[in-house]
Amino acid sequence: LLEGKRTLVVLHFMGSHGPYAQRYPEHFAAALDWHAYDKSVLYTDSLLEELIDSFRKNPRVRAAVYVSDHSEIPGVGHAADLFEPEMAAIPMLLYLSEELRRERPELEAVLRNHAQRIFTNDLTFDLMLDLMGIRNRFSPPELRIARPEYALTPERAMTLQGRVPLAPPPGVASG
């Protein structure tokens, strides 16, 4: 997939959707006395680690983004009618190749500066454009995490079709 000069690859993981025990191989983490949900998260983490290792070895991979669509509460799931704020607190991982870091040091600096800021999945498209160096004059810079002007606040960050503001998880800057 990565033989062309310009290629966008999208991988979709089932991640930690229930039933959790079906989200990792039976033998995986057998020695751990953990809930199946936690093992599914650990398995996803191990897959991401393998991917990042392979990205580092492939000069064609310049950037990668991993983001979950939602979190879950074991035993509750992620149903909108049972919404709890922790269901919206999701991981995001960014990988920038050494080459991209050398070519665009300001990109890495801006992303590191915003690493603890609140971010919503609907902004991922603009992030991808910025990582690929594609100009986008239609999205406001204050909603683009790869831009110095990024200024999404919890009051503006919404979930559940724009009905519920996101409160930042502990340790995440709100402004």
Image: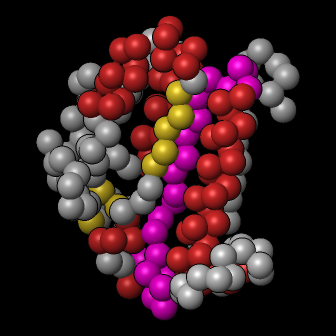
Which residues make up the magenta segment? 58-80
What percent of the width, then of the height, locates residue 41?
56, 68
What percent of the width, then of the height, locates residue 164?
27, 65
Residue nearer the viewer, 151 or 170:
170
In this rendering, the answer to whether 58 lies above or below 17 is above
Residue farthest to the front, as pictured:
31
What percent of the width, then of the height, locates residue 39?
59, 76
Specify how the rendered protein is coloured.
Answer: secondary structure
Residue nearer the viewer, 47 or 117:
47
Residue positioned 47% across, 65% down in the render: 70
In this rendering, the answer to whether 165 lies above or below 102 is below
Residue positioned 57% across, 14% down in the render: 99
Residue farthest to the top, as pictured:
103
Residue farthest to the bottom, as pictured:
75
| Residue 79 forms part of the magenta stretch | yes
In this rendering, the answer to whether 113 lies above or below 78 is above
Residue 125 appears anywhere in the view? no
Residue nearer the viewer, 130 or 104:
104
> Quarter of the image holding residue 139?
top left
